[in-house]
Amino acid sequence: MHRSNSADQPPTHLSGDARQQSSSRKLPAHRGLDHGFTLLELLVVIVIIGLLSGLVVPRYFDTVGKSKAKIAKAQMTSLEQALDQYRLDVGSYPSPEQGLNALVTQPTGLTKWQGPYLKKDVPKDPWDQPYIYKLSATQKDVDIVSLGSDGQPGGSGEAKDIALSDKD
């Protein structure tokens, strides 16, 4: 049985004259300007998108950098509160050798330790680096430092060191 492609055949429900007009009707090869975008139009749109992203993207990343600095400060404040509770229980801050780990693991020989003082392990800074714990020479003050995005002392912008003792 041979099936013909219905697209090749004129519709059977039309009269003879209408069938002939229907089958001989062809779409124009070119319909005018509604067929797509010109290369110039596409280039103009790409330039506009480039200009907008040049303005928006730096502001977005600056905001992300400031957010990370705020997260670091908030974590340092939380660590400071845990260190203060540790000092109240034990009578002194952890030694530099014990560091911040003394907040989650009982140091050897301490019977007054009532920890853990943190619900989880000691957090890393927002740049996935450990915080630096500093005990003053008088052992009455502590400081906690993040070395910023570059992990190196000093720096500016997002790479700037952030310390609990900073008054920002």
Image: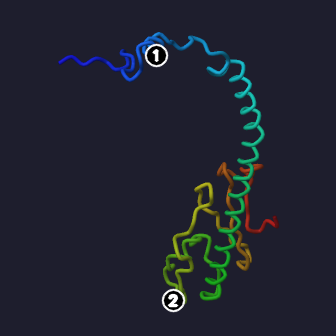
Element under disc 1: helix
Residue at image location 72% in from the left, 38% down from the top:
53
Residue at image location 66% in from the left, 48% down from the top:
150
Which labelled disc corresponds to residue 18? 1
**Image x and y of residue 3, in percent:** 24, 19
The answer to whether 122 is drawn above or below residue 23 in the figure is below
**How far separated are the C-alphas under marks 1 and 2?**
103 Å
Amino acid type at mark 1? Ala
Which labelled disc corresponds to residue 94? none
Q: Which image quadrant for residue 44? A: top right
Image-based side of 107 in relation to 86, left or right: left
Element under disc 2: loop
**Image x and y of residue 118, in percent:** 56, 76
- Sooner in the amino-acid sequence: mark 1 or mark 2: 1
Amino acid type at mark 2? Thr
**Image x and y of residue 69, in percent:** 71, 59
